Amino acid sequence: MSSEHGHTEGVDIAAVTGGGKAAWDGFVEKFAGRIFSVCLRVLRMRDPSAEPEDARDATQDVFLKLVRDDFRLLRSYDPARASLATWLTVVARSTTLDALRRPDNRRVSVPLEEDLGLEAPQHAHADTPELPLELLSPRQRQILHMLFDQDMDVEEIAVALNVHRQTVRSLKHQALERLRQHLRACGA
């Protein structure tokens, strides 16, 4: 069905799938708790000792699935067949079960040092020392740009790059440490 569903359960699906940040943030805020609960319940059915962190990872996988391929799955939602909350429950359950069925039961990862063709931000401040381009990897530059220039949080970056939150935190830490060392060496 098309994305012209209008408002469903207080959510403007067309705005969410149209890429509006405020609409997406509202959607995530409204349904993250429900999706998390479903993921945790499914994980604990398989393993009663499953941790909330595992459910958070599964929740992230659900949101990634919803945005993948220009919101293809979310655009397929049909309000005539089920409420949005019920449909998301089914998506969360099936996504979590699919993850549990993976042979290695781990997330698919993206190589961290691949060349993404990213450029350094073009709007350096006049009082900022010039940094050698090779000081940071393309991925580290991208993460710092998303964190500080685009004001995204770790969760948003992890979703956007299809990596685990800890990967974002680790790359941020490595990049900031390299910058500190460089600035100390320059006497800044």
Image (cartoon, rainbow, N blue to C red):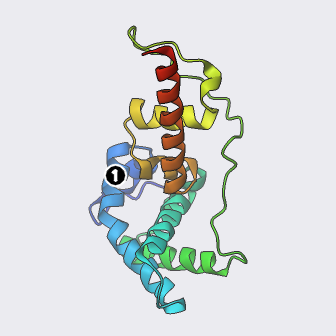
Along the viewing direction, whichever of 128 and 54 lies nearer the viewer: 128
Residue 86 drawn above or below residue 74: below
Residue appearing at x 49%, y 91% in the figure:
45
Residue 95 drawn above or below residue 66: below
Along the viewing direction, whichever of 2 and 155 lies nearer the viewer: 155
Along the viewing direction, whichever of 5 and 90 lies nearer the viewer: 90
**Kind of element beneath mark 1:** helix
Three-letter amino acid code at the position of disc 1: Asp
Residue 100, x across and y down, in percent = 61, 80
Is any atom of residue 164 visible in this view? yes
Residue 158 drawn above or below residue 59: above
In what quadrant of the picture does the C terminus appear? top left
Q: Which residue is mark 1?
A: 25
Residue appearing at x 45%, y 15% in the figure:
187
Is any atom of residue 2 visible in this view? no
Residue appearing at x 45%, y 51% in the figure:
17
Residue 72, x across and y down, in percent = 57, 57
* Quadrant in the rendering for residue 88: bottom left
- Relative to residue 36, is residue 115 drawn left or right? right
